[in-house]
Image (cartoon, grey):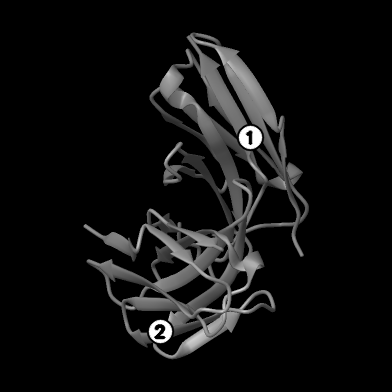
Amino acid sequence: GIQVEQSPPDLILQEGANSTLRCNFSDSVNNLQWFHQNPWGQLINLFYIPSGTKQNGRLSATTVATERYSLLYISSSQTTDSGVYFCAVNYGNNRLAFGKGNQVVVIP
Amino acid sequence: SQTIHQWPATLVQPVGSPLSLECTVEGTSNPNLYWYRQAAGRGLQLLFYSVGIGQISSEVPQNLSASRPQDRQFILSSKKLLLSDSGFYLCAWSRDSYNQPQHFGDGTRLSIL
């Protein structure tokens, strides 16, 4: 099946710092989503991004489908950005294959 | 707008007991529905998905089953729970058109004793 790899697995940031999370996938995909899982377990949709770049506040994402990767940028990080960030790829029938996530801790 | 509900939020069950987790979606019709499990706090695995009433596809062999008795209702069941069934179970929905994003419920945290 399709493989989704995220890096780095763990990241500690000082509040105010910027960071980049990466997602590589092994095969062509129909689409890609980025999620933030908060400490209560809720999965929050961040981006639905098959290709190109999107921005939402301090977060932005870029997907280069031809090279099979996507990047999530966090700028001016805040403690509320802590949690696990998941990349998930749509491989047919709108099914998602998830990476193992990026655990982000933002310290004040 | 569309909403998705899961219950219960937390469940503690003894080994060998039955299980029924329910998920319902409001504000849309004929959605695709999905059950995922998250073990050890990382990585979600797709267990089942459904494109219509009574239509269930299983992604991995396991001790669980799923049913879709109504258009917007998806149920995850087991006749006899195993310790390995512990985890965080999430339900999701998407529109039934090609290439649609998924939206997740708040999940059920299941502990097997």
Could you say where residue A102 lies in the image, as x and y percent from the top left? 63, 34
Residue B97: where, in percent of width, then height?
43, 70
- Residue at screen point 56% across, 23% down: A105
As helix, strand or loop, the secondary structure at mark 2 comes to strand
Q: Quadrant of the N terminus of chain A?
A: bottom right
Q: Nearer the viewer, residue A59 or B88?
A: B88
The amino acid at mark 1 is Asn
Of residues A7 and B101, the one nearer the viewer is A7
Height in image: B55 above or below B13? below
Residues packed near mark 2 inside 10 Å, few (<14), some (14 to 19) or many (20 plus): many
Quarter of the image holding residue A79? Answer: top left
Q: CA distance from mark 2 to mark 1?
A: 33 Å
Please give left or right for residue B4 compared with residue B88 in the image: left
Chain letter of disc 1?
A
Q: Residue at x 59, y 15 (%)?
A: A13
For residue A105, say whether it is visible. Answer: yes
Q: Residue at x 67, y 48 (%)?
A: A99
What is the number of the mark on residue A102? 1
Q: Residues within 10 Å of mark 1 (few under 14, many from 20)?
A: many
Where is A93 relative to A17, above or below? Answer: below
> Which disc is residue B68 wearing?
2
User: Quick check: B30 left or right of A95?
Assistant: left
Mark 2: amino acid: Arg
- Where is residue A107? Give x, y as percent: 52, 13
Element under label 1? strand
From the viewer's perspective, is A25 left or right of B56?
Answer: right
Q: Which mark is residue B29?
A: none
Dot 2 falls on which chain?
A: B
Picture quadrant where residue A3 is located: bottom right
Residue at the spot 26% in from the left edge and 60% down from the top edge: B2
**Looking at the image, can residue A71 be seen?**
no
